[in-house]
Image (spheres, rainbow, N blue to C red):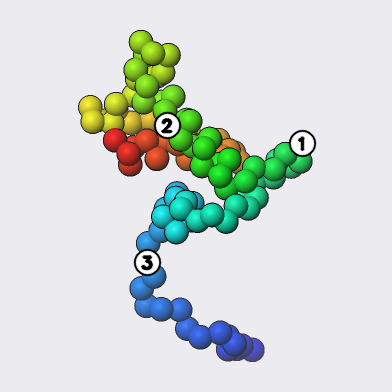
Amino acid sequence: MLHQSMYPPMPATLPETNAHALLFSPELVNSDRDYVVAIDALTGKQRTKQEFIERVYDGATALGTPESQGGLGIDGSKGEIIGIYSYNCLVCHHSPYKSVAS
């Protein structure tokens, strides 16, 4: 049996996007609205949008700060690239942020 969707057809082309672009879009970052973006399933700790953004900036700072000042000294202008992948990890977003910011 053939069922027709009750929704209109999808557009022929959809804009390309990813989670990083969504999380750091100027509309969301510059918005005064704060809300919970993550809840740790084991501890119940909640992290708000602003806490998440601050954590991303802290991670990017740690990656880009020179080793002489206690950082990792990663320099995107020299072609250095890192990748951090972890299951259900909010910290991994500072890697693309640093690469975009360099």
Q: Can you name the residue that lies furthest to the front here?
A: 32
- Where residue 60 is drawn, which disc sits there? 2
Q: Are marks 2 and 1 in contact (CB under 8 Å)?
A: no
* Residue 69 in which image quadrant: top left
Task: Nearest to the eye among marks 2 and 1: give it.
Answer: 2
Label 3 sits on residue: 15
Q: Earlier in the sequence, mark 1 or mark 3?
A: 3
Q: Amino acid at mark 1?
A: Thr
Q: Residues within 10 Å of mark 1 (few under 14, many from 20)?
A: few
Label 1 sits on residue: 43
**Spatial separation of the CA atoms under disc 3 and disc 2:** 27 Å
Q: Amino acid at mark 3?
A: Pro
Q: Earlier in the sequence, mark 3 or mark 2?
A: 3
* Residue 68 in which image quadrant: top left
Q: Is residue 55 left or right of residue 3?
A: left
Residue 38 in view: yes
Task: Nearest to the eye among marks 1 and 3: give it.
Answer: 1
- Residue at 28% from the left image edge and 31% from the top image edge: 76
